[in-house]
Image (cartoon, rainbow, N blue to C red):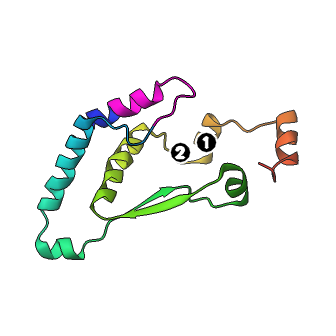
Amino acid sequence: MLHYGRHRAAMGGREEGTYVDVKDTPEEMVEAVDALLSSYWNSLTEEEKRRVMYYLSIGSQNQDYRGTIMDGEVAAVVSGYHSLMGVIDLFFMSATTTWVDNLEGLDELLPPESGWRRWVGRYIQKAL
């Protein structure tokens, strides 16, 4: 997790407009993830290895008009042993996310718009 956190921080701190290749992963992180996953995989019996299925769904699940036309949303499904890498991202996301339990909490983070912003938002809501 330490290597992953450092890698994410380095990616976020890169100069704007710089291309970041997803394959540009530090070797020590690859080794740590492989050790973690192989430890789990090796703990399974041969029967469990034959029966188990892993899937990782990546991308947008919205699939709405605006996203499809304007954002070019896409989704992919990865299966097999290497799809377990998404588990690490799930733990990282859980630790860095602000979870909202009610409308008051949402309004605190995103105050309701009023005045001209509300008017513009309603006027162009279909395009957005």
Q: Earlier in the sequence, mark 1 or mark 2?
A: 2
The kind of residue on which mark 1 rests is Leu
Percent from the top left, x then y, of residue 18? 52, 28
Percent from the top left, x then y, of residue 28? 22, 35
Q: Which residue is mark 2?
A: 100
Q: Which residue is mark 1?
A: 106
Q: Quadrant of residue 69?
A: bottom right
The reply to whether residue 26 is visible in this rendering is: yes
Distance from disc 1 to disc 2, alpha carbons, whole Å, reads 6 Å
* Classed neighbour count for the residue bearing mark 2: other residues with Cα under 10 Å, few (<14), some (14–19), many (≥20): few
Residue depicted at 32% across the width and 47% down the height: 88
Q: Is residue 86 left or right of residue 3?
A: right
Residue depicted at 56% across the width and 59% down the height: 61
The reply to whether residue 115 is visible in this rendering is: no
Residue depicted at 68% across the width and 54% down the height: 67
Q: Secondary structure at mark 2?
A: loop
User: If the image is split into quadrants, where does the N terminus sit?
Assistant: top left
Q: Is residue 127 left or right of residue 59?
A: right
The kind of residue on which mark 2 rests is Val
Query: Magenta segment: does it hold 16?
Result: yes
Q: Is residue 105 above or below residue 83?
A: above
Q: Is residue 117 left or right of residue 42?
A: right
Residue depicted at 27% across the width and 33% down the height: 2
Query: Magenta segment: does it hold 116?
Result: no
Percent from the top left, x then y, of residue 65? 72, 60
Q: Which residues are magenta?
A: 6-20
Disc 1 + disc 2, Cβ < 8 Å? yes
